[in-house]
Image: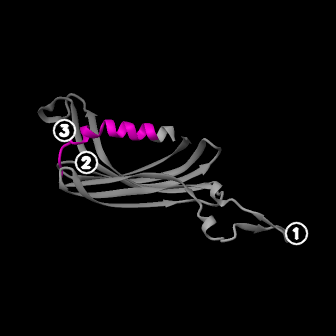
Amino acid sequence: MRRLLLLIAFALAFAPATFAQDYSDWEFYVGYAHERANNGADRLDTTARRILPNGSTAPVDFRSRRVPHNGVVGEVVANVHPNIGIVVNFAATFANTNSSPLIPYAHALFGAMHYHAKFPNNDIACGSGGNSRDETAFAMGFGGGLDIRAGRHVDIRAGEIDYIPVFFSHKREDNLRFSAGVKIK
């Protein structure tokens, strides 16, 4: 409770700084979501009792079980005023209730790629730019893979494959990347 009060006090102390933010008509947000949620089983049984093998019953406390969920969250904001916006929020989280050591995943990545190449002094590919070339371009990555749980803090990445299009000013380059290794968590 004390942490919650400190968080609220911190947010209120810095609230005036939010009025100094740049104004944009639209805002978009996509991110990872982790939720430790009530498993909801307490709403399914009105008696909150479990039948034992000998036929007697015992009370059950389902609320004490928190189930971890992983997923995505996204938001679209239409700002109608510098301090007022209409928000559409969506989230999808999933719990793996079995104890399978296999963890499949998929991802979509958006960012930039920087290209740097050095050529021999007599190479005509450099033109008047000397013997090196630099270029930065928008890039995306779409792919997925499979992790295998090896311990509480270690997974073995059996394999990951990504399709990586890079949009240089002169053309699009299509690339594939395969990787495998160890993930520490």
Residue 118 is left or right of residue 89, and the answer is left
Q: Residues within 10 Å of mark 3 (few under 14, many from 20)?
A: few
The residue nearer to you, when weighing 111 against 77, is 77
Look at discs 1 and 3 and give the one toward the viewer. 1
Tell me where residue 106 appears, x and y as whole percent.
45, 57
Q: CA distance from mark 1 to mark 3?
A: 84 Å
The residue nearer to you, when weighing 148 against 3, is 3
Q: Secondary structure at mark 3?
A: helix
Tell me where residue 90 appears, x and y as whole percent.
38, 61
Tell me where residue 21 appears, x and y as whole percent.
21, 42
Say the numbered circle drawn on residue 125: 3
The residue nearer to you, when weighing 93 against 126, is 93
The amino acid sitting under disc 1 is: Asn
User: Which residue is at a point 42% across and 55% down the rendered structure image?
Assistant: 107
Q: Magenta includes 14?
A: yes
Query: Could you tell which of marks 2 and 3 lies nearer the N-terminus?
Result: 3
Q: Magenta includes 158?
A: no
Q: Is residue 49 above or below residue 129?
A: below
Q: Secondary structure at mark 1?
A: loop
Helix, strand or loop for the magenta stretch, by majority = helix
Residue of label 2: 138
Residue 128 is left or right of residue 178, and the answer is left
Residue of label 1: 54
Q: Residues within 10 Å of mark 1 (few under 14, many from 20)?
A: few
Say the numbered circle drawn on residue 96: none
The residue nearer to you, when weighing 17 against 96, is 17
Q: Which residues are magenta?
A: 5-24
Q: CA distance from mark 1 to mark 2?
A: 67 Å
Query: Could you tell which of marks 1 and 3 lies nearer the N-terminus?
Result: 1
Q: Is residue 152 above or below residue 108?
A: above
User: Which residue is at a point 21% across and 29% down the rendered structure image?
Assistant: 131
